[in-house]
Image: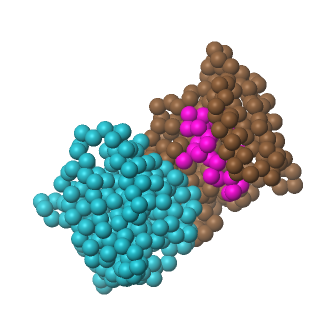
Chain colours: A cyan, B brown
Amino acid sequence: MSAQILYGKPCADKILDDVREATREKRTTLYAVGFDNPQWNQYLHTLRNSGEKCGINVCSNTLDENTSVFTLCDVLQRVCGLQDADGLILQQPLPIQYMPAVKFVDVSLDVDCVNPESVLNLYRGTSGFRPATPSAVLRLLDFYGEKIAGKHVVIVGRGSVGKPLALMMLARDATVTVCHSKTLNLPEICKTADILVSACGMPGLVNQNFVNENALVVDVGLSFVNGKSHGDVSPDVCEKCRALAPAPGGVGPVTRAVLFENLVSKNKSCNDN
Amino acid sequence: MSAQILYGKPCADKILDDVREATREKRTTLYAVGFDNPQWNQYLHTLRNSGEKCGINVCSNTLDENTSVFTLCDVLQRVCGLQDADGLILQQPLPIQYMPAVKFVDVSLDVDCVNPESVLNLYRGTSGFRPATPSAVLRLLDFYGEKIAGKHVVIVGRGSVGKPLALMMLARDATVTVCHSKTLNLPEICKTADILVSACGMPGLVNQNFVNENALVVDVGLSFVNGKSHGDVSPDVCEKCRALAPAPGGVGPVTRAVLFENLVSKNKSCNDN
């Protein structure tokens, strides 16, 4: 028996069709502010390429790594004042010293949910933008017809994906367990999951001992080892579980699509999706 | 075999001793803004009595229930500008139409953690005030020498106590499960807990089937039925579990003490306590 593989591409394509439809009427611009480093530059490159294919103009504002927090605040305020700005993303993870700047990302442009008010909306489950990666996990599950309410969702990782995902899964009526590096009996706890999401960036951590045969496994970890990308989930897990969204190829493509969707949707009534 | 009963009073007394010490040097004032209703008035009455015993002056500003959100914002701004204001609490739960006002509770006075920036601190685990009730749960466990890191904490309830408590337990390295009204197999999941916290306000919900013999149970539910107060935990649970913080008499007294402690401590380096 082998697991159903939940590829992200068909889900992303469906979302991007709608994005293209929206940008046909109005050219859309995403501003991206970050610091000059290889990961951010690579991310911008991919973002620009994907944007071009669906009528989204990605304008980057790359700052020197010695930029002060005050300058960053100024830059963000200026970008938020631009008439063509439909959305603004800030490099993630943001070095700790720049954290006070997040409130200068206007809530109405905050398509990746960094402003305190956006986080408050996430926390409360009220209307507003949600961060793209955890949104993409939910979208992928929805796309494949997976029911979330009442399920026991175990999340491995309490970082920039795990924590918001836990809140969003709660808002979707899942019973949620968050595990992390200090969790004892990790395999045992993971084995109780209906839906197991790993987002901790430890290649191959999740093996066959972590899953039951009815489990749906979502791999959100992505690490680079010797130039090759690896997920958190060992490939042989698909011999044992019911379904697997692999990394790469699962949540990844959906994440960018969801970011663009946020950009064109501009504050839907509720984005817990 | 009967469980150890974790009474809140000795823990609260210890905290209040320190509060008294602090207010001896400087008279301290807590402003309380809310709407005219019996629960809030009763809460104010208790708060004032407790405050008097440890040098804390509780000033209330009770608004008519027809007050507009704009007026509430004005009132909050005015109170935050008062020179003698050491802290400001806003009625909880706050009716939804008044939610936009929470940002007018200045972060430096926000001793019950309602301002978006305070919530962001809670969410991120960064320095700042934490809400009093979940803080009181942690303080009570600390007082009785209970280790939290690595423990499996199951929380029943995802409201104004359960959600922040989940984040604070995570910040203390617990593995955290959040259950709620849509959880299937609630007793089974609760039975896996090292520490079980019930904060859902359903009298007697947690019975002997919810606990294992090594479990520590914390009752944060408090409901009034026919004029008598009841916790979420059925009294006979103490025949089966290792330890029980009952309601009333457990977390309750510690909650007010923690609120006063926040008031005199004014932004300690980290309040995840």
The reply, left or right, for residue A207 in relation to residue B228 is left
Q: Does the magenta segment cover residue A108?
A: no
State which quarter of the image contains the N terminus of chain A.
bottom left
User: Which residue occupies the foreground of this view, A124 or B12?
Assistant: A124
Tell me what residue is drawn at x 87 percent, y 51 percent. Answer: B227
Residue A212 visible? The answer is no
B263 versus B68 height, above or below: above
Q: Is residue A120 above or below residue A235?
A: above
* Region in magenta: B87-116
For this rendering, which residue is in front, B115 or A151? Answer: B115
Counting labels gives 0
Which residue does the image show at 38% across and 50% down from the upper left? Answer: A78
Q: Quadrant of residue A66?
A: top left
Note whether residue A266 is visible: yes
Please indicate whether residue B131 sits to the left or right of residue B167 in the image. right
| Picture residue at 24% right of the left edge, 56% below the top | A40
Residue with the most extreme top position: B25
Q: Position of residue B174 (x, y in %)?
A: 46, 48
Relative horizontal placement of residue A116, taking residue A17 as reference (left or right): right
Looking at the image, which is closer to me, A268 or A192? A268
Measuring from the top left, give residue B153's x and y in whole percent. 52, 52
Q: Position of residue B139 (x, y in %)?
A: 57, 37
Q: Residue furthest front?
A: A83
Q: Residue furthest bottom?
A: A1
Say if the magenta span includes residue B96.
yes
Q: Residue at x 50, y 74 (%)?
A: A148
Q: Is A43 left, or right, of A179 in this rendering? A: left
